[in-house]
Image (cartoon, rainbow, N blue to C red):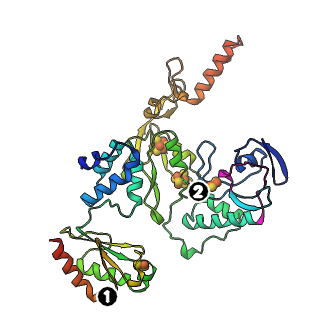
Amino acid sequence: MRQIIEGYPKEPRYLLATLQDIQEHHKYLSVESMKMVAEYLGVPESRVFSVATFYKALSLVPQGKKVIKVCNGTACHLRGAPKLVEALEKELGIKNGETTEDGFFTIQTVNCVGACAMAPVVMVNDRVYGKVTISQIPEIIEEERKDAV
Amino acid sequence: MVEVTIDGQKIEVEKGTTALEAARSLGIEIPTLCYHEGLPPDGNCRLCQVEVTDARGRTNLVISCMYPIKGPVEIRTDTERVRDARAFVVKLLLARSPHSPVLQHLAEEYGVEPLDARFVPEDETDLCIRCGRCVRACATLGNNCIEFVWRGWEKEVNTPFKEPSNSCIGCGACAQVCPTGAIRVTEDETTRTIWDRTFDLVACERCGVRFATPEQLKVVSPEFKPVDGRVLCPRCRKLEEARAVASGLGAQEEN
Ligand code: SF4
Ligand code: SF4
Ligand code: FES
Ligand code: FES
């Protein structure tokens, strides 16, 4: 953690970059890590917390190895995104926003990811699945789990 | 200096004076929520809108607390368009904080229908209108203990990590500038509690009233500097100062 933080110049403008870097390596921002960043960059803790809670790409709870993002933009919503979320929740036994106990999966809903022609869209980390149907969900999970192991 | 007309009255103002300041100096009232004389303006509530017609005859709605007067413009603070714009702002704010007395009052003034009871969550007790005065007050004092956190519907003002902030000095400035009374400060005989932190209160060495936290006294703002080695509350400080001046002038000391 310290290594990541100290890789940046001690200037307030590196706040977001530092937080993103920690997010990338640790999959979430712990309170301790945010306090460390505040002290190192000389930014008030209130500001760090404000930024950390503003961006959807930053998370305050641990994220799974595979983050499943279900697009819930207008097109995807109309084409059944809420049903996909339900199916995922059932399949993984967690709620939207939560992470499985084995640390493999997190479910999230996001706004339009810009691939409306393929609605409904599900992204698993950087992989994009288009025109997803409920019946495909178990397959996708299976495949991604193999990949994660 | 530039001459401007506000609701038919002419006034000369320094370049850069805001439309709001100019109007107020004429005694013309413009409603505001996020604006506060002692704080940097932020222009986020949009309640203070007025109409401005420039030299070329173009008329626009502007945010008066953020509109610097640069030329000879005409400002109107109470046209139908202005009232409509303000009513719209009030409507939106009221939807978020339906139980805020300040907003209910404004709604009445601008003829805004209260939200249909079906849309008002019963347990909606949030009075905060996200105007950020508290955040700016605390930052202006250099303490930076509170900020906007989360976003969208969840956006609120809170301390870092929602924990009691260790840079808070319990001065209560945030609560004082809050236009809606959203920030809770409670005091008993010897303590003050704000943002989940409880502070001791120090007594005035003249009248015994407990008036400030030790943390506040430590930051030695001039109004708390001891007088003749004694820690005095603002009231006793004034009395002592007046007395010093009076005796300095050789006047009869009053008791
Ligand atoms: S009471 Fe604390 S949070 Fe409020 S203005 Fe003072 S220092 Fe800031
Ligand atoms: S707590 Fe009060 S001052 Fe702070 S943002 Fe809310 S309404 Fe404004
Ligand atoms: S709405 Fe899902 S990609 Fe646009
Ligand atoms: S008072 Fe001017 S925008 Fe809020």
In the rendered view, tell whether residue B186 sits above or below residue A137: above
In the rendered view, tell whether residue A139 sits above or below residue B245: below
Instruction: Answer yes or no: is residue A117 visible.
Output: yes
Q: Considering depth in this image, is B187 or B158 the residue closer to the camera?
A: B158
Callout 2: CB less than 8 Å from ligand 4: yes
Q: In percent of the image, x 41 and y 82: which residue is there?
A: A76
Q: Amino acid at mark 2?
A: Asn
User: Is residue B85 shown left or right of residue B194?
Assistant: right
Q: CA distance from mark 2 to mark 1?
A: 43 Å
Q: Which residue is mark 2?
A: B44
Q: Magenta stretch?
A: B63-80
Q: Amino acid at mark 1?
A: Thr
Q: Which residue is mark 1?
A: A133
**Which chain is home to disc 2?**
B
Q: Position of residue A95 (x, y in %)?
A: 30, 74
The verdict on a common chain for dots 2 and 1 is: no
